[in-house]
Amino acid sequence: MKKLFTSESVTEGHPDKLCDAISDNILDAFLAKDPNSRVGAEVVAGKSYVFITGEIRSTAKDIDIEQIARDTIKEIGYDRADIDIDYKTCTIIVNVSSQSPDIAIGVDKSLEEKEGSSIVSEGAGDQGMMFGFACTETDNYMPMPINFAHRLTKRLTDVRKDGTIPYLRPDGKGQVTIEYKDGKPFRVDTIVLSAQHNSDIELEQVRKDLKEEVILKVIPNELLDEDTHYYINPTGRFVIGGPLGDSGLTGRKIIVDTYGGYARHGGGAFSGKDPTKVDRSASYMARHIAKNVVANGYADKCEIQLSYAIGVAKPVSILCDTFNTNKIPEDEIIKKILNKFDLTPRGIINYLDLQRPIYKQTTNYGHFGKEGLPWEKIVEL
């Protein structure tokens, strides 16, 4: 049976990703000086303004949040207020408060510990459910649509920064539609690629360069055919971009950050949150578990759900769904997971070593499927 599935990705210059990057750089700056920092940093960007808010509790001193924001905007490449935003002249407003004591009291010591249990852990920073996913479609155990979408937008940024296509600006996005046959990826049906550019370049040049230097450098030729559809800068012009073209907000690209819609999502965003927030740490752990279920040969596809109650250390529930691809019973997989991993917030933080300034590398082109991140390591399960 034929089926089409589509996923999107965006460049680091997309206004939402600009906000995510500022949030994660703030988090890294605090963790570098105080690994126990509690950070929930949120950013809004629009027309020459960047507004930074949230809650932070830390012993770290002399963290210049405004300068972190300006340095982030500069690194991305935004320096023109007339068409996007200028790191030198934009107005940055910092309005950050301390973590609520009502939240801190539940996070600092779990309900189990308060009631005399032997479990010594922080409580979960919030209630919620988190999902992790893995499959055998690609070498990095990610679904093929989101994997190619990320590679396109990463390439789009690379050719801008290395001068291969010098007229590009930071904003951009991509989308890939994969045709599946009998549940397996078969061909690329459609590619959408939109890139911000200087005003003095012709559309046909943009389309030619993006196809030759981005699409054909990323997508294997055997997956393309005469019926593949290409939509490159389909509006015909993309000069105004970044926060001038559209507002940005931390945490608005949660599907881009995860599995491109291929797997379920609990709704919690990642960027700007320290690892006591299970929205982030438990999602990373769920990916680690799902990837290792597949990598160890127990299933060809696996989705893990973890759920937590605020202030409680142990998960309320854990679910393993292998979509009938399992080689051993799912209840046996659950037993292996529970025997292998401590799924309390402290257990996850310690196992993945999350109280380090590692989050800048997660911000763009997905939090999963990248080599070198602790939740991507393969272990014996």
Image (cartoon, rainbow, N blue to C red):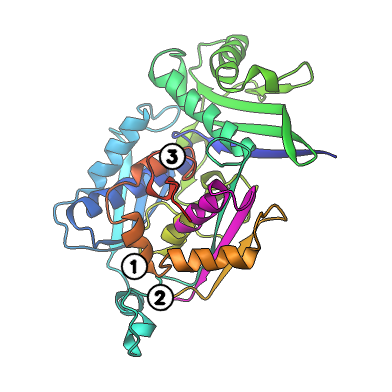
Image position of 96 (left or right of 286): left
What is the spatial separation of the Cα atoms under label 1 and label 2, in whole angstroms?
8 Å
Where are the magenta residues, as a range?
285-310
Q: Which mark is residue 313?
A: 2
Q: Closest to the observer: 195 or 95?
A: 195
Q: Earlier in the sequence, mark 2 or mark 3?
A: 3
Separation of marks 3 and 1 at Cα, in angstroms: 41 Å
Residue type at the position of mark 2: Ala
Q: Judge the density around disc 2: few (<14), some (14-19), many (≥20) Cα neighbours within 10 Å.
A: many
Which label belongs to residue 180? none
SS assignment at label 1: helix
Disc marking residue 346:
1
Name the outermost residue toward the right: 1
* Residue in the picture at 58% in, 48% down: 297
Q: Along the polypeptide, which appears first: circle 3 or circle 1?
A: 3
Q: Determine the CA span between mark 2 and mark 3.
A: 42 Å
Q: Amino acid at mark 3?
A: Lys
Q: Count neighbours of disc 1 (C-alpha within 10 A) and say few if under 14, some if 14 to 19, many if 20 or more.
A: many
Identify the mark at residue 47; answer none if there is no mark.
Answer: 3
